Image: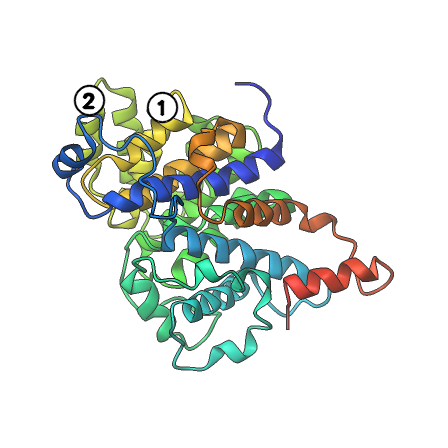
Amino acid sequence: MEHCDPADRFTGCLLGGAVGDALGAPVEFMKLVQILRQCGPAGVRGHAPAADGMARITDDTQMTLFTAEGLIRFGVRSRFRADSSPRAMVAYAYLRWLRTQGERTRAGLEADAGGDGWLFGHRELHQRRAPGLTCLSALRAMLSVDEPAINNSKGCGGVMRVAPVGLFAWRLGWTPELTFDTGAQVAGITHGHPTGELAGGALAVMILALVDGANLAQAVYAARQCLRTRPGHEETLAAIEGAERLARSDTRHDLAIARLGEGWVAEEALAIGLYCALVADTFGEGVLMAVNHDGDSDSTGSIAGNLLGTLLGVQAIPQEWLEPLELRDVITELAEDLYGFVDWDIGEKGGDEELRQRVLAKYPVG
């Protein structure tokens, strides 16, 4: 593989996840036999565009974007005061996403979240794209941005949105252990089962390692090393090791994916996305494999797209999939800001006053 610039990996991660999401969205609730009947014997081979020609994203990408925005706001806020945490700022970002869905938290926590900012202003995000019921209910019931969800859910709605944690962590030079814990905390904002949290931590570490130039096997090894030290890790570890084992076997891909599950729960979605990334020779091959199966095709497509987009960079994503992608420019700009925020000269003492005002308008911190 040719050298890939880290900034290209950031953009590849977020655009890759969005492409996988959009490819899988039209067939999310279909069995493979139905997909083949509707799309032909090869299954999904490209976007099924809406009437206006756009390839629509779902709540998976919406929440991934708000994860990235919350992390950037934490990075900006920390320049001025140390009174928050990545989890808290991402939780506030999810409350903004909740408002885009026409709902609010019962505790009125939105008042403390700062201004709406740039991302909230994009009308395409103010549409319900089959949002996860656990995400909605957990955010409605949230009493504190510093506490995990009070439920026992391990649905894939936690893991499918945490890839930006790995990017953010790499930019700040975090250890795999800190990255893992933050990824788990971010997933745990809405999903309280250990597997729902730990799968998020594992994906965040994989993304961290891939940005740093690791191959997939090395990235998985780093995630497993962190995972093994956490209580309740057995289910997530077994799923990851199952994906690795099947990737080394001569099992037919569709049968291998079926053995890993359907992706509705966290460890299955992570395992399917990981398996498809491990066995693929190209971005396109891996993502198409990840959406052509029984189950949660957009979430598994998102995870495979995050992994392969980070590994291979944005140049590996087929242009015919990028061109009609909804919010492509917004996703690209957010990836660029997630990469660049550490270099913004916005400190209170000195600094670029014009830039500071522009950044604080885009990413207000309260």
Res. 219 in view: no
Graded by Cα atoms within 10 Å as few (under 14), some (14 to 19) or many (20 or more), the crowding at tag 1 reads some
Q: Residue at x 50, y 64 (%)?
A: 93
In the displayed structure image, the side of residue 355 where residue 128 appears, left or right: left
Q: Secondary structure at mark 1?
A: loop
Depth order, front residue of 199/313: 313
Can you tell which mark lies on residue 280?
Answer: 1
Residue 318 x, y percent position in the rendering: 45, 28
Depth order, front residue of 128/106: 128
Alpha-carbon span between mark 1 and mark 2? 13 Å
Depth order, front residue of 176/286: 286
Q: Residue at x 39, y 20 (%)?
A: 281
Graded by Cα atoms within 10 Å as few (under 14), some (14 to 19) or many (20 or more), the crowding at tag 2 reads few
Residue 330 x, y percent position in the rendering: 55, 50
In the displayed structure image, the side of residue 318 where residue 255 appears, left or right: left
Residue 112 x, y percent position in the rendering: 56, 77
Q: Residue at x 49, y 39 (%)?
A: 13
Res. 43 in view: yes
Residue 349 x, y percent position in the rendering: 85, 64
Please count the marks in the image: 2
| Mark 1 in CB contact with mark 2 (< 8 angstroms) | no
In the displayed structure image, the side of residue 343 where residue 201 appears, left or right: left
Q: Which residue is mark 2?
A: 252
